[in-house]
Amino acid sequence: MAQASTATGDERRQLTRAVIASTVGTSVEWYDFFLYSTATGLVFAKLFFPKSDPAVATLNVFLIYAVGFVARPIGAAIFGHYGDRIGRKATLIATLLLMGLATFAIGFVPSYASIGIWGAVLLTALRFVQGVGVGGEWGGSVLLSMEWGHRGRRGLIASWPQFGVPVGLFLANLALLIMSNVAGPSGFLTWGWRVPFYLSIVLVAVGLYIRLGILETPLFARLVAQQRIERAPVSAVIRRNWREIIQSALLRLSEQAPFYIFTAYVFTYGTEVLKRPRNFILYAVLAASVISFFSIPIFGYISDRIGRKRMYMYGAATMGIWGFVYFGLLDSRVAGLVFIGILLSLIPHDMQYGPQAALIAESFTGRLRYSGASLGYQLASVIAGGPAPLIATALFAGATWFGVKVGGYKTSLAIAVYILVCAVISLVATATVRDRTRTDISAEYDERPTPAPTQAAARPLPGQA
C-alpha cells in the first residue's frame, strides 16, 4: 500500500512538472509566433514594402505571414515522426530551439532601405523556420501533459498547453506596447520593434531549462518497453487515420480563422479603417488575452463534465453568430464599443480551444498520437490560420475573384459571413468525430484493419484506469 501511495505521489509531481514544462514552453513558442503576427500589422508593410500601394503592401506582408502557416504541417510531419519514434521530451527541446533562434534572428533583418527586397526574402525564410518549429511544438506539448494525466480530467490537463496561446499573445503585445511607448512613433519604426525579438532568446533559455528537467511520459515509455514503436509513424497514421486527420483540420476552421482575424488583422483594420491609435488596439488585444487566461482552462474543465464534442459544438455555434456582433461593435467607431468588441472577441474561440487539444489527441492511438494529432491540428493552418488575414483584407476591399466581385465594398459584412461559413463547416466536421472523453488512452485502440494489438498492449497503465 505504501508503494502504491508513493507511486501516486510521484505521478502527481511528474504531472505538475509536465504541465508546467508544457505551458512555459508553449508560451515561449507562441510569444515568438505572435510577435511576428502583431509586428506584421503594425510595421512590416512600411519597412519591407515602402514603395507599394498601402493595400498591396498589406497583402504582401500577410503573404509572408501565411508562409509560417504553410510550414506548420511540414514541421508536424518532421517532428511528429521523431515524437513517435524517440519520445515527446527530446522532440520538444528541438522545436523550442528552432523557433527561438529563428525569432531572435528576425530582429536583425535589415529593412528595404538597407538591402532592398532581400529584407523581405530573409523575413520569409525565417518565418518559414518559425512555422516548422511551431508545427512540431503543439502535439508534443499536449501529449506531455495529457499522457501524464487521469482520463477523468484530460480536458483540463490538456488545456494548459493551450493556455500558452494567450500567455504568448499577452507577452508579445505587452513587449511591443512597452517599446512603442519607450521609443515613440519614429523610434518604434526604426529600432523599437526589434527589441522584443531580441528578448525571445532569454525566454528560450528559461523554457529550455524547464524542459530538460522532466521525464518522458509513461505511455510512451510503455510503448518502448512493449516494442510497439512504429518505424514510419507519419505514413502509418495517414494510411490508418486519414479521416481523423481531415476531421481535426476541418473542426478547427471556426476556431483558428477567426482567431487570426481578431488578433492579427485587427491591427490593420483598427488603425487603417477605424483610425484608432496603435496603442489602443494593443491595449484591447492585451486585455482580451488576459480573459483567455481563465476561459481556456474553464472550458477545458467543462468538457470533462459534459463531453468534449458537445462543448466544442457549443463554441463553434457561438462563433458563427459572434462574427456579426464583433464587427458591429467595431464598426460603431465608438471607442468604448470597439474596446468591448476586441475584449470579448476570444471567448467564443476559447470555448473551442479549451477542449480542442484533448478532442484531437484522443482521436489517435498512442503509438501514432504525436504524428496524427500534429498533422490534423497543423493542416488547419494552411486552410484557416494563414489565409484568414489575407481573405479578410481581400473581402473588405471587395476583391474580384475569378471574374466575380466578392466582398463588402469597404464593409466588414463579408468578413462576418466568412466566419459564419467556417463555423458551419466546423459544426459538420465535429458532428462526425467520435467522442472519447471517457476512453482510456493508455490502451492502444485501432479502428482501421490492422494486425491486432497484443494482450499486454491492451492493458491500461497503473494509475491511468
Image (cartoon, rainbow, N blue to C red):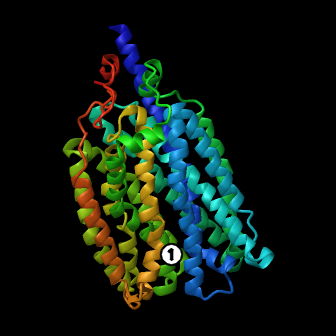
Residue 111: which quarter of the image?
bottom right
> Residue 433, position in %: x, y?
25, 49
Answer with left or right where residue 316 lies relative to residue 158. Answer: left
Badge 1: few (under 14), some or many (20 or more) residues near its Cα, within 10 Å? many
Q: Amino acid at mark 1?
A: Phe
> Residue 430, position in %: x, y?
26, 54
Kindly tell me whether residue 372 is visible in this rendering: yes
How many numbered badges does the structure rendering display?
1
Answer with left or right where residue 304 lies relative to residue 123. Answer: left
Farthest right residue? 114
Answer with left or right where residue 234 lies relative to residue 424. Answer: right
> Residue 330, position in %: x, y?
38, 80
Q: Nearer the viewer, residue 424 or 81?
A: 81
Kindly tell me whether residue 275 is visible in this rendering: no
The residue located at (71%, 65%) in the rendering is: 122
The residue located at (55%, 44%) in the rendering is: 78
Residue 129: which quarter of the image?
bottom right
Residue 278: which quarter of the image?
bottom right
Q: Nearer the viewer, residue 240 or 217?
A: 240
Pick the quarter of the image with the N terminus.
top left
- Give the vertical position of 322 relative to 405 (above or below): above
Answer with left or right where residue 47 lies relative to residue 142. Answer: right
Name the residue tied to disc 1: 267
- Give the vertical position of 99 relative to 386 (above or below): above
Q: Nearer the viewer, residue 110 or 360?
A: 360
Pick the quarter of the image with the C terminus.
top left
The residue located at (46%, 35%) in the rendering is: 144
